[in-house]
Amino acid sequence: MKKIKNREDLERVRKRIVKKSDPNKPCITISSGTCCRAYGCQKVTKAFITEIEKLGIRDKVEVKTTGCLGFCERGPIVVIYPKGIYYQRVTIEDVSEIVTETILNGKIIDRLLYIDPVSGKKFVNGEEISFYKKQMRVLLKNNWLIDPNKIEDYIINCGYTALSNALFKMTPEQIIDTIKRSGLRGRGGAGFPTGVKWENCRRANGDLKFIVCNADEGDPGAYMDRCILEGNPHSIIEGMIIGAYAIGSHEGYIYVRHEYPLAVKNLKIALNQAREYGLLGNNILNSGFDFNIKISIGGGVFVCGESTALITSIEGKIGEPRAKYIHTVEKGLWNKPTNLNNVETWANIPIIINKGSKWFSAIGTEKSKGTKIFSLVGKINNSGLVEVPMGITLKEIVYEIGGGVLNGKKFKAIQTGGPSGGCIPEKLLGLPVDFEKLKEAGSMMGSGGMIVIDEETCVVDLAKYFLNFILDESCGKCIPCREGTGRLSEIVERITSGKAKIEDLELLEELSHVVKDFSLCGLGQTAPNPVLSTINYFRDEWETHIKNKTCPALVCKELIQYYVDNEKCTGCGVCKNLCPQKAILGELKNPHSIVQDRCISCGICHENCKYNAIILSSPRGKN
Amino acid sequence: MELEKIDKIIEKYSSDSSSLTSILSEIQAEYSFLPQDALKRVAEKLEIPMTQLFGVVNFYKIFKLEPSGKHIIRVCLGTACHVKGAHGILEEFERKLKIRVGETTKDLAFTLEKVNCLGCCSLGPVAMVNDDYYGQMNTVKVNSLLKRLSSSGKY
């Protein structure tokens, strides 16, 4: 690999790559993100290569692994170019047929196409599927085309053009101005204007400044950043170099969580390739500008996603947050001015430089611009990653893109913002996705997790889940968070076990406000949100738990009871064998029964009964 | 303890404290935990007090002071997995392995851990064994997985 010497040389290299590639050559792309790996995409890739070699057509057909295509529910996804034929849930058994029929004979294999469950319509082209059609894929577009381990793939798709333009055609002030005018706000959750942050950091005193990319995507239920890190790492790197040039920094860090091994691997490869090409390191493209990036691996601690804690963690210390009256743009990493942005924010930078601030600010609402990636998961038909313009309504996301609730159940709420967010009920589904609007509804944008819950999810249990999560993750530095979340959790535990009094609800709300108002960092300040938002919208359900000591969604273990429907039970004995408590009695071929005193409500009998003979109920006064 | 091995790992990184977690991760990848002698060596080489080093090791969840099992099972308890019954999966592992989460079986065959989110939320509930992911878990799959992994047939 030869170093790219200057701006003109980059264009020459790009032309050379374009010349070498034949757009009409059949290309089999296999989505190979973490989800697809779980589905066995690596075996599928291997099978394609073997098959093509066996037929002696290795030179005529290209096999490429790409990042995540977003429709994780349907993985592994294989797209055949140049026609763009979209095959879903491909297994190694399908490989030989795809090569013979589709590649050699040009025929489409019907059974591998996506069929819309509502209309029954089949789709050859992925773009046409309702899941993708309503999306606006700006950041995720290249995930379809790029092999993340080949910098050439990024370069051919306009990669590093923005960097070249920024370095040679723009002054740092012009870049900052462009970002400011674009209206881009931090995608990590709080939504601080990116351009303003950059300007503050540029103005901060000191020669040594740092750039940090927050890739510690700890929000449970959110994985947008993982998808960019794995599928298009160069977009983040390019964004960071532009940011560094604008701010006047020569050293950067990417803090990535260790739970994402593939992201770390792809990132390392991308950094090395960028260095070898001369796009990172000293004297980038002969511009005289130096910038380097190091990777720092997280230690599995949620609070380290908070900017000040993350910075302390990079320093090799205990990752505790500090009060933010001194901003990190003034005193951050090693007390030097530090500009920290999230993965998705950095990935937006090259796009804004290439397309201009006007183009970007035309997308979205008055105060929230551009697109946002959400991980649409939980009880939803089309689960996966969706990139939508800001301002789209939650209803459009859930029903038009997501295809509605799983198994035809009733929609209950959508949880956004992770442990810092809240549940938005059905009556507010018309709400546009916007930083301010979500906050007004008692939730927040957060990093972009959207967990759909249905009638079988208990909101009290969900609030308990988030509280216990925070309790586990609280670093313990400040008392309101450390002790407060513990006491909140105890109260909720009383409620879910039928031991609470109605006054407990009031106490819960009061204490929630104390934790919110007095905690040191964002973790504690937002920790009570799941409790408060569910009490606000689902007060009935909380009160039913307390007054009737029942769980309407049949989730809270201490309030539910399993019993056998004698008419349906065939006496097959499966449940009796599986019951870990030996709580099921009965003779073979005769209806069984459950000894309630022994039952721990694990639900194994219910899960494994073929005859639906195990009934779940929440009788009043079980406790 | 082969201190040369530890020295080689330390040498790969810069000698300031920012390399600490990376160095510790690599040592752990080698030994499956952080042996005390290795920690002493790191403290010495990076010139940081042992107390500070222990603070860091205890704070970050990835670090272990005791050997892990051959198979490290990590059950995802992310929100999407939670609403699809991840706790039931974790409990089934606990019952079958006869250990609590965070513990290792006596024969060092399995370590059971929980993890906040593995980031494959569409596949929930998800479990990970060493480097392999297993999606759409249920109690039956827990048992077949353990049977397949357990060479002694004990689990």
Image (cartoon, rainbow, N blue to C red):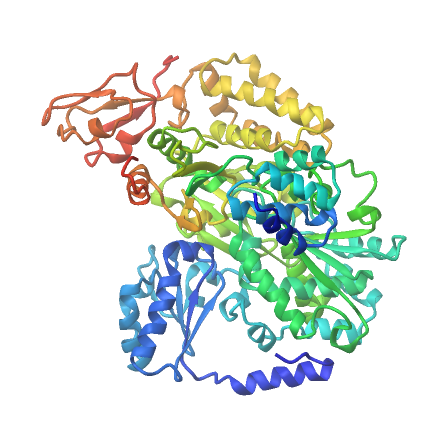
The quarter of the displayed image where residue B52 is located? top right
Q: Count the numbered circles shown.
A: 0
Q: Where is residue B25 in the image (x, y as percent from the top left)?
A: 59, 47
- Is residue B19 in view? yes
Q: Which residue lies furthest to the left in this view?
A: A589
Vertical arrangement, residue A227 with respect to residue B1, above or below? below
Instruction: Specify the quadrant that holds the N terminus of chain A.
Output: bottom right
**Residue depicted at x 78% and y 73%:** A283
Nearer the observer, A111 or A46: A46
**Residue depicted at x 39% and y 34%:** A456
Instruction: Specify the quadrant that holds the C terminus of chain A.
Output: top left
Vertical arrangement, residue B150 with respect to residue A535, above or below? below
Nearer the observer, A440 or B61: B61
Q: Where is residue A126 in the image (x, y as percent from the top left)?
A: 42, 67
Left or right: where A155 falls relative to A43 = right
Vertical arrangement, residue B110 with respect to residue A146, above or below? above
Left or right: where A281 falls relative to A116 = right
Vertical arrangement, residue A186 with respect to residue A274, above or below? above
Q: Where is residue B152 in the image (x, y as percent from the top left)?
A: 29, 39
The quarter of the displayed image where residue A532 is located? top right
**Residue depicted at x 65% and y 73%:** A276
- Is residue A234 in view? no
**Residue depicted at x 11% and y 22%:** A587
Left or right: where A271 falls relative to A127 = right
Q: Position of residue A559 (x, y in %)?
A: 39, 20
Q: Residue furthest right?
A: A205
Left or right: where A535 falls relative to A336 = left
